[in-house]
Image (tube, grey):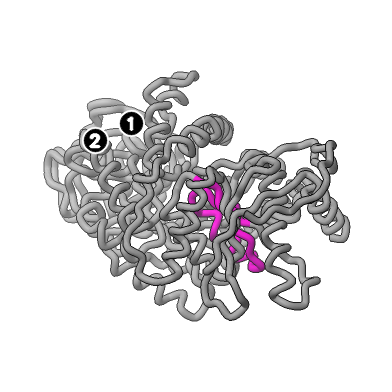
Amino acid sequence: MISITDEHYNNRNYLSSKYKITPRITPIIVTLYDVKVTEFEMQKYIEHGLKIVRFRLTKHTIEEKIKLLDHLKRAVKVFCQKYEICDWPVAVSIDLANGCIFTGFLSEEIPENFVILKKDSIIELTSDMKYCFKCDTKRIFMNDPYTLPAIPVGAEIYLDFGEVVMVCVKIVNNKTIKCKVIKEGEINDQQKVCIRGVKHLKPALSKRDLEDIEFAKTYKCDIIIINTVRNPLLIEKLKALFKDSHIPLFLSVICDQEGLDNVKEIIAVSDGLVLAREYLACSIEKPGQLLKIQLQVGALCKMQEKHFFVSGHILQESLLIGHLVESDISDVTMALKQGAGLFLRSYSNECNMNQIYTLINNICLDEDPILMKTQHFSDIPCKIPLNAAETCIQASILTAKLVNAKVIIVPTVTGQTVMQLSNICENIFIVAVSKSPVVARKLQLFRGVIALPYDDNTAAFWESEKHPRIKFGAAYAFKFEILKYRCPFVALRKATSCSSYSDQVDVWSLTEKEHVRLQIKLKQSLQGR
């Protein structure tokens, strides 16, 4: 064990900020799509541990997209000044609608921004473009002329994930069908359309998707979330589009039965998977098996060491009733125990997103200590390592379990070691120290990872820099209160500058005096900015 020994220093709050940050293990993707969202609101999310933000760019102009990114940048800067930290990387993800089906826009003659579709009323569903901006209580436009002719009589059609439910009663022609409303509700512009039991035939990657891809290239977005992924060929095609620019992480969203049928192959080519429960509940023939599907898909992701997220129906009933419901708490808790991340899509009211995010953050903070204590050696998938790098990764995990360490600190260049470490051992904090802000932002997607950009260039040689990086990570681990004085933590790093991977595992501990010195150094670096 490497111990940095100094005399005891009895002021353990010296130079500590009056504000505290409590990181969580579970990654949460939060959707901020309203251009009216302020820097202050973004800062509030960051204060509750926001590490991944999703922007819905479908309805926004280039200027509005740039404005959102600028708001986020300034919110991070204010947050870092308030909490006295060097940087807090927030990964930016964009959404590709891909094969999702939408309704059109309400007619300008309608005074309100919504219409109510009454029960038992007959509605025309059409793909004729001349009705795209003329939706009303008698006719709804659907932007998929490929799938509409395949809808049979008797098929159930869901608008806005079941806000309105219709059933097809008559096929008029290849562009129009007549539907009867069996569940009334209100809709507004561009609502999602799901059809139960019907294969979606809409081609992948529309012109608007390609424009968003160019935006992601220009502004170096960290994560691309692709909706309605039905086969692995789409992900391979997207990767080819980015071969001459930075390579983002690709999250595939499973929205229909075809995607479920090919899920194993999709997981293999993706960096992670999102199970869109809100889509699947309205599209698969047996929605009662959704829980079983979630467990199976989560297990497949774990076998292939890929990250798994769930979206839809998160605290949904609690939001409608106005107080927490036991079934909602059980649903979130089960997802956390499964090792899943949470994907919060947009809500009609921004206050609802704030409430949901705060509640889920509190649940995660309550569950994390339990998950860290209950993980047994048998839960760690210790397969036969393929190379020396995998051997060292497994050795660091087993060492952490043996000495009861809650933190593994990893200096990293590309982030590959951290990604593998997170995929194998889910319920432990991994402090990743990287000189690349791009790598640090990408690593925020992974479970248990706290990514820290390291910009101290005072060391002239690698040998004189390896220990300061470990101490830098340890100082922040103490600041975030995931480490305590004299408690062991594991460091996974290169043994020499010639090593091509992290091949040395050490057990460290830190005294209070050394921690004070590190905090002084951090404070000086902040004042020098």
> Given the image, on which type of amino acid does mark 1 rest?
Leu
Which quadrant is home to the C terminus? bottom right
Residue 293 % position (x, y):
25, 43
> Given the image, on which type of amino acid does mark 2 rest?
Met
Residue 74, compared with residue 82, is above or below; it is: below
Residue stretch in magenta? 428-451
Number of other residues with Cα within 10 Å of mark 1, as a class: few under 14, some 14 to 19, many 20 or more: many
Tell me which numbered mark, 1 or 2, is placed earlier along the sequence.
1
Q: Do the residues labelled 1 and 2 touch (CB within 8 Å)?
A: yes
Label number found at residue 412: none
Q: 227 or 339: which is nearer to us?
A: 339
Disc 1 target residue: 117
Residue 143 can be seen, yes or no? no
Residue occupying the point 48% across, 67% down: 213
Q: 510 or 428: which is nearer to us?
A: 510
Residue 162 % position (x, y):
32, 34
**SS at badge 1:** strand
Residue 253, compared with residue 247, is above or below; it is: above
Residue 178 can be seen, yes or no? yes
Residue occupying the point 75% across, 46% down: 511
Number of other residues with Cα within 10 Å of mark 2, as a class: few under 14, some 14 to 19, many 20 or more: many
Disc 2 target residue: 166
Residue 35 in magenta stretch? no
Q: 205 or 467: which is nearer to us?
A: 467
Which quadrant is home to the N terminus? bottom right
Residue occupying the point 43% across, 62% down: 250
